[in-house]
Amino acid sequence: MIGKANGAISITGIGAYAPEHVITNDELSQMMDTSDEWIVERTGIRERRVAADDQALSDLALPAARDALEQAGLDAGTVDLVIVATVTPDMAFPSAGAIIADELGAPDAAAYDLSAGCTGFMYAVAQGYGMVAAGLSRHALVVGGDVLSRILDWSDRGTAVLFGDGAGAVVLERVSEGGFLGFELGADGSGGPQLYLPAGGSRTPASAESVAERKHYVQMNGREVFKFATRVLVTSAEKVLAECGKSIDDVDVYIPHQANVRIIDHAAEKLGIPKEKIVVNVERYGNTSSGSIPLALADAQVEGRLQEGSLVLMTGMGAGLTWGSGLIEWTTNGRK
Ligand code: COA
């Protein structure tokens, strides 16, 4: 799916939250056969955050959502749409969206979850955009977050070292001009088995057997996912830029999904975008799945990189296999 935006809609508030507990590479190397040197060289990751035992996804999302609303200057009661991109909701149902809308105090909001792996946030932003553009929503809250620590096999060094927990949220509203220029989203289900959670759904419900066979943990073919990720980060970005009549040189801030520094470097080189325009925080958080792009957006904002008129390119990719880009001319002017 690709399209140019047909209404001025922008991000008017950003919030992010990562749990306090830090696990360093050295700590991981005491739990499994790995080393700080290997992890840093292959991924760029130095540490990740892990949720406390009593924290579920909604507990990570709520502080992020409250901060985003505060920054937008909105009362939670005016939120009419809550979309939560996650593959680790508190439970299969009710949705994390419904739980979060209730906790926030948004009784008039439509609220639900969206599953698109690490691309979830980009899908959810595009969907929120569409709802606001169509006039169905005035104040949309889009959350991206995951508690992947709960679905990692902590004895599998091929996956456990890569991921972390975290969440972010943005508010979408109409503005006078600028805002989102376009989106490009896609999915290739034939690549699904490269990154998946085998059990716990209707195909293989939880059983003593499925637990014993460790089928409730993330399974990944790292090399195949690496090839896919480096390819789509480039193609998706190029497609959305072309659709919007922009070139890579026009981009001021590039926010790729924070999976691995090597993947980001690869894509940056192919795209021809200089390092100083790229937001990278994977060394502190690991891959937080749907939390990654909003956490990076929040960091970019704190660093003063999101200026009025800045052209910001965001691209995610992940399980599905899925990918998605959004291009936004940063503005909060003339909110309606
Ligand atoms: N510590 C130490 N050694 C490890 C290790 C770890 N955590 N994980 C794997 N290894 C070993 C392998 O067993 C292998 O050993 P061998 O040569 O004796 O068989 C060796 O390191 C090389 O493994 P390989 O899988 O070829 O490494 P790689 O360079 O492809 O890096 C990933 C592995 C997972 C870091 C890389 O493939 C990757 O980043 N893939 C994308 C994953 C991703 O981002 N997924 C989410 C997308 S949203």
Image: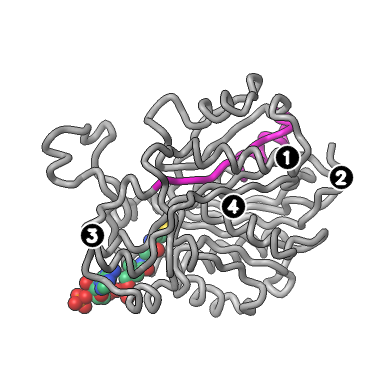
Q: In this view, does 130 lie above or below 36?
A: above
Q: Does label 4 point to a residue whose CB lies under 8 Å from ligand 1?
A: no
> Residue placed at 66% from the left, 20% from the top?
108
Q: Is residue 245 something that shows in the picture?
A: no
The CA distance from mark 4 to mark 2 is: 23 Å
Q: Quadrant of ligand 1?
A: bottom left
The amino acid beneath tag 1 is Glu
**Would you say the residues marked 4 and 2 are in contact, meaning their CB atoms lie under 8 Å apart?**
no
Label whose residue precedes the other's in the sequence (3 or 1): 1
Residue at 17%, 40% (x, y): give it: 211
Dot 2: few (<14), some (14–19), or many (≥20) neighbours within 10 Å? some
Q: Cβ(mark 2) to ligand 1 < 8 Å?
A: no
Q: From which residue to which does the magenta span run?
A: 125-147
- Residue at x 55% of width, y 62% of height: 236
Which sits earlier in the primary sequence, circle 3 or circle 2? 3
Q: Quadrant of residue 296?
A: bottom right
Specify whether residue 23 is in view: yes
Q: What residue type is labelled 4?
A: Pro
Q: Where is residue 86 in the image (x, y as percent from the top left)?
A: 46, 42
Q: What is the number of the mark on residue 70? A: 1
Disc 2 to disc 1: CB gap under 8 Å = no
Question: What residue does disc 3 label?
Answer: 156
